Image (cartoon, grey):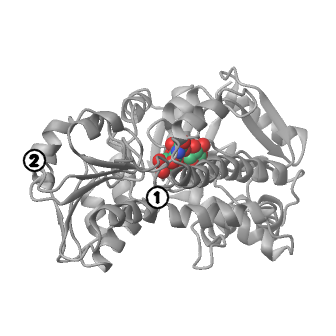
Amino acid sequence: MPKKVAMIGTGYVGLVTGVCFASKGHDVTCVDVIPEKVEQINEGKTPIFEPGLEELLLNARKEGRLEATLDGASAIKKAELIFIAVPTPSKEDGSIDLSFIEEVSHTIGKTIRDVTDKKTVVVKSTVIPGTTEKVVGRIIEEESGKKRGIGFGLAMNPEFLKEGKAVEDFLDPDRIVIGAIDSESFNEVKALYEWAEAPILETSPTTAELIKYAANSFLAMKISFINEIANYCELLGVDVKDVAQGIGLDERISPKFLRAGAGFGGSCFPKDVAALYSHSKQLGRELILLRSTLEVNKQQPLRTVELLREEVGDLSGKTIAILGLAFKPDTDDMREAASIPIIEQLIKEGARVKATDPIAIPNAKKILSHPNINYYDKINDVLKEADALILVTEWDEYRQLSPSDLKSLMKGDVVIDGRRIWNPELFHKHGLRYRGIGLGKKKN
Ligand code: UDX
């Protein structure tokens, strides 16, 4: 049975969720406060870059199952389910900023005050455990004069979407978690997922909130773990890739998320681990593993600069080529990208930076701007006159670069592989001084 859904917030998560629900036959109204975004969506264009999304959006528009509006109240009034998908940014101290969630909860509460039908409010945003019940539920009760479970339903339904694979992840999920206050709320949300073959987990809202944070924290911890082992491998003269393969074959460990490198970035891992850590401290039960996960990740990008210094010495006046700026390949997202601390450190030490990326340069320019940083679209242009290069993001096109081309284009001969994409032997054979994260120095 198709449901009527209001999706409040058309950021990355809200838009993907709204468009995917519409593609499964539900009637979706997306709400946002930015007129340009609303216009764009109604024209069938996506404000974000995400493979497969525009096609689904166009289709949903054609079939009349999705529209965008600035008018939150009317969208709420006609919906059976109201999704909250607004941002939950970090504050300076790492704790979560719930002001958008609170604002939307006030609007929902005021709007449902005079409606007669029972609506279900669903939190999709990533929120600290307890938020759905203690913040969203409380505000809506105060504003609407209705009791949860009687006047309105309440649930939390976390997302597990990877950038660049969000549509795929949504339409073919590993699991669906629905944390609901009662079975009626649970069934309402479940009805949206009739098409999904994945297991559906029924929990409390607080459990669902924690599942989201624990999943991201665990993955982030796995990366920091292998990065710590990588740094230790360098001292022993062994290769972390062999160690990752050796432990990854144990089914209990699995080979996934064991790629050592310049550290994790993006919009989720750094923010979510910091938020959960900060919350645990507030509650007086500090999650020490999360603190370590963040500490390792803060140091990790700078490990590439240390390797560089070991080869080049004083960096002052040196020209360093940077390959890759985005936090991972196939995105132009620069949030918490390893390239930021790496380039800042190089500049601090007096180096000149020539940087390239297939699509992230416009976003990088907004964050990293200095007379000694220059951006180039072409790889050849960054390599020219470079004393050394650091590979920061493992774009496919960088994998194909041949060591002989690098050797002929660069002034110097130092290559730092921050993501371990190249074959060290091949680079050594061509007379390049290759250093990689988690690989001991070659003995001459
Ligand atoms: C992540 C989670 O995967 C997703 O489930 C959640 O909903 C949002 O956060 P995303 O941030 O899009 O998704 O990227 P992901 O592909 O998971 O990579 C995150 C970061 O970890 C990247 O900077 C990547 O380079 C790094 N990473 C990942 C490693 O350094 N090593 C690995 O083995 C895997």
Q: Quadrant of residue 94?
A: bottom right
Read off the residue under disc 1. 70
Position of residue 95 relative to residue 320, above or below, is below
**Hey, what amino acid is under mark 1?**
Leu
Name the residue at 40% across, 27% down: 59
Camera-side residue: 246 or 101? 246
Mark 2: few/some/many CA within 10 Å (<14, 14-19, 20+): some
Give how far across and how far down residue 85 sits, in percent: 59, 53
Read off the residue under disc 2. 409
The answer to whether 175 appears left or right of 400 in the picture is right
Camera-side residue: 273 or 104? 273
Name the residue at 81% across, 45% down: 179
Q: Is residue 241 visible?
A: yes
User: Looking at the rendered structure, which numbered label has been put on residue 154?
Assistant: none
Give how far across and how far down residue 72 sits, in percent: 55, 58
Name the residue at 23% across, 58% down: 388
**Hey, what amino acid is under mark 2?**
Leu
